[in-house]
Image: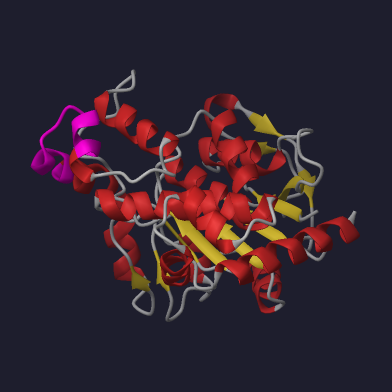
Amino acid sequence: MYRTAILTYDKAAFFELGCAIELFGLPRPEFEHWYECEVVSFSQKPLSFISGIQLNCKSVNNLKGYDLLIIPSWPTDEFDIPEIIAREIKRFYRKGKRIISFCSGAFLLAELGLFENRKATTHWRYAEIFKGRFNDVEYVDDVLYLHDGNIGCSAGSSSAIDLGIEVIRSDFGNEAANKVARRLVLSAHRKGGQSQFAETPVQSEAGQFSKALDWALLNLCKPINIDLFASKANMTRRTFDRKFKANLNITPKDWLTHQRLNHAKSLLEKYDYSMEKIAENSGFDNATTMRHHFRKEVGISPSSYREQFKSANQGRISCR
């Protein structure tokens, strides 16, 4: 069980705070282990938000009792950070604990020097302000989020949810993350390297392109010809490739590989199947091909992933 603090302040962005609470603070009785989450503030007074909303949250003077810190937002203008906040977040980070920011929350982490000589992103509307103020940060344009396991940041509000899902995936596995995504009625198609905004607006009803993605997810174990994939979207191959690039910033082939890896992770978490059977059920030609893609995207072998996930589960059980 991960003890989680969601940091807020007076006149904070209410929607991003709500996203953090929905992801990490909502009780999830369907899971045996989950986050122990509190909304905290370094203020002693009730906090004010838009439209006259006031919030009473837990007042703290340190972050010692937490393992994960979430910063949903922070002012983007020049802002004097209260000394207690600066001290406690730096101390939290030096102890190797995890911090993630949503949207403008990256400004606080950058101001404290936590992104020094690292990659970071924020909402595209704040990009030029961010780049102009923090010359020691390698700003990455047009990604949904960045997350290296220890520190993470996201672009706009919806991509904050994508980052949250990725953190849940790393903590509790692929199946848990997918269940949370389904409960939030989220697409299973997005990953961190995608574009911050699509070429065309999202439609209220699933179009042929979205239906084609759903079809592919249901048929991952089978060979999928990209021309057939395009036909499921009722598009020519050229239009399909262009649509993928504009909306997902990835090729159809790479997207399929990513989804197959996600499916392989779920199988590795749940079953003691051989690597050949995992590869076959995930749509890879063989275990060697799966291992190659696993190392390229995940950074470790499938066997190491299985062992790490088992070790993580044992650690969670002992923390209860």
Residue at left 52%, top 35%?
A: 15
Colour style of the rendered protein structure: secondary structure
Depth check, front residue: 77 or 66: 66
Residue 271 appears at what percent x and percent y? 68, 52
In the figure, 185 relative to 2: above or below? above
The answer to whether one can see residue 162 in this image is yes
Residue at left 75%, top 41%?
A: 57
Q: Quadrant of residue 289?
A: bottom left
Residue 67 appears at what percent x and percent y? 74, 62
Residue 205 appears at what percent x and percent y? 33, 18
Depth check, front residue: 179 or 227: 227
Describe residue 255's horizontal placement relative to residue 86 as left or right: left
Q: Quadrant of residue 176?
A: top right
Depth check, front residue: 88 or 158: 158
Residue at left 61%, top 36%?
A: 179
Question: Which stretch is magenta?
Answer: 228-242
Describe residue 246's horizontal placement relative to residue 65 as left or right: left
In the figure, 320 relative to 187: above or below? below
Residue 180 appears at what percent x and percent y? 61, 37
Membership of 229 in magenta stretch = yes
Describe residue 94's horizontal placement relative to residue 13 as left or right: right
The answer to whether one can see residue 79 in this image is no
Membership of 258 in magenta stretch = no
